[in-house]
Amino acid sequence: MNIIDDLRARGLVADCTDGEGLAARLAQKPVTLYCGFDPTGDSLHVGHLMGQVTMRRFQLAGHHPVALAGGATGMIGDPSGKSAERNLLTREQLAHNVSCIKRQLARLLDFDCAGNPARLVDNADWTAPLSYLDFLRDVGKHFSVNMMVAKDSVRSRMEGDNGISYTEFSYMLLQAHDFYHLRRTCDCELQIGGSDQWGNITAGTDLIRKKLGVPAWGLTFPLITKSDGTKFGKTEGGAVWLDPQKTSPYRFYQFFVNTEDSMVVQYLNKFTLLPLDQIAALAAEFAANPGARAAQKALAREVTALVHGKSAADDAIRASEIMFGGGLEGISEALFNDVVGEVPTKPVEKAKLEASGTVLTEALVLAGLAQSKGQARKDIEAGGVYLNNQRVTDVARGVTVNDLLFGKHILLRKGKRTYAVLSAR
RNA sequence: GGUGGGUUCGUAUAGCGGCAAUUACGGCGGACUGUAAAUCCGCUGACCUAACGGUCUACAUUGGUUCGAGUCCAAUACCCACCA
């Protein structure tokens, strides 16, 4: 099966500038392709994953992926899909963000393989030295404002109340210029991106055709829409980041385990490298026995391993089994320590646990599970508080040295899945 | 510029002068289940208390009337509608 058919089968093709032409070209010999990531934050999040995984698919099919960090475009701000003007980032922030996301971009692709190693570029390298006058003459001349105004990203902003600044209006020229630059310097013939990037990508293929007279293709994948209308990748706690410091591998794993039934097969297709027949088998198993949630677990395992590595994924799985597997009996100290690593931990003086100990309400506040003793009391009375995985309903319960696990830790839990640990010292 | 209507707890809404203030959604917790969906129950301004209960801060802003004001009056700001 060729790569295009595989992408189609996975539902990863929203639009393509010339599907047949591209398929024919891909069949001939390896193609160089790129996907850009703007450094709007100091980490990428799961929303960016699809671009990276899709590049990985191309790499596995023998093509040459180029990951582009938007050191230049990040200074401007992409108007696509935004309803309001963005605040500009400072240069320091931007430099910091670029260095952070470069590391993450390096994670999913193989930069060392023999035949088709991936490359990492920063569009600031070729954009910053350009003079404004040269840019206007060499690039701007090829775009008609009439066409630019007609693009979705611009039109929706012009129809809105907030308008669009000249700066953001120019964004598509920069991105078009990137594609042109890569086409000229490293023979990059294909750009991929989310479907919101369609306008920017076609601006690039147009520019290449006009200036170089050679073909170039654009391919977009559909943006994920959830059934309840909320944005993919956002949880109550905020975005799900790829940076393990910001979202631990355990939380990352949990995010995918909690995928809703209606989306899980789609995600398996789009976010994992599992072969299609294996996904079909999983889908069948899942349909027969949804309660076992084999599909969610497979999804979470695959994606976590892809992003954080196999051993981190295994740790997350083991920690999850403990947290959701019932009691703590018979758990080894080593295993427990694994769990502790995944849970917010606060220190507590051992002296406070002597004699009658610390009242549970206070312990909850100390652990950060309740913001006041009053709130803690309500939670306990509602039956939502667990000490070492045992429900406690007595508000005045004292937490003492007798409750310490392995002489060190106290495991507190609010509700089904919010854990915290107090470590005695 | 003129006339009328509005501004209440995350959002949306109710509130003939005694109100920490209705209802819905959301959020949190519980039951059922599959770490789901649907459903049902409890909590939901903050803080203190084992508890009865207490303290503080709140209905755009400022000032007034009143024992008492989200509620009445006045000015200011912002929003909406109609007219020009």
Image (cartoon, coloured by chain):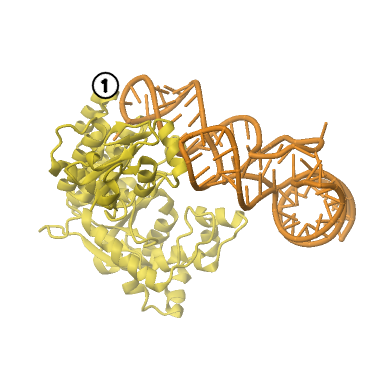
Looking at the image, residue A24 lies above or below residue A262: below
Q: Tell me if residue A252 can be seen.
A: no
Instruction: Give the chain coloured orange.
Output: B
Q: Where is residue A112 in the image (x, y as percent from the top left)?
A: 13, 60
Q: Tell me if residue A236 can be seen.
A: yes
Toward the viewer: A162 or A242? A242
Q: Position of residue A199 (x, y in %)?
A: 44, 55
> Quadrant of the image for the N terminus of chain A?
top left
User: Measuring 51% from the left and 64% from the top, which residue is drawn there?
Assistant: A169
* Rendered shade, chain A: yellow
User: Measuring 31% from the left and 73% from the top, which residue is drawn there?
Assistant: A125
Of helix, strand and loop, which one carries label 1?
A: loop
User: Measuring 19% from the left and 37% from the top, which residue is drawn there?
Assistant: A275
Looking at the image, residue A176 lies above or below residue A377: below
* Image quadrant where residue A384 sits: top left
Q: Which residue lies furthest to the front in this view?
A: A355
Give the residue type at disc 1: Asn
* Category of crowding for the residue at label 1, using alpha-carbon neighbours closer than 10 angstroms: few (below 14), some (14–19), many (at least 20): few
Toward the viewer: A380 or A247? A380
The reply, left or right, for residue A58 in relation to residue B82 is: left
Q: Mark 1 points at which residue?
A: A289
* Image quadrant where residue A230 sits: top left
The reply, left or right, for residue A407 in relation to residue B28 is: left
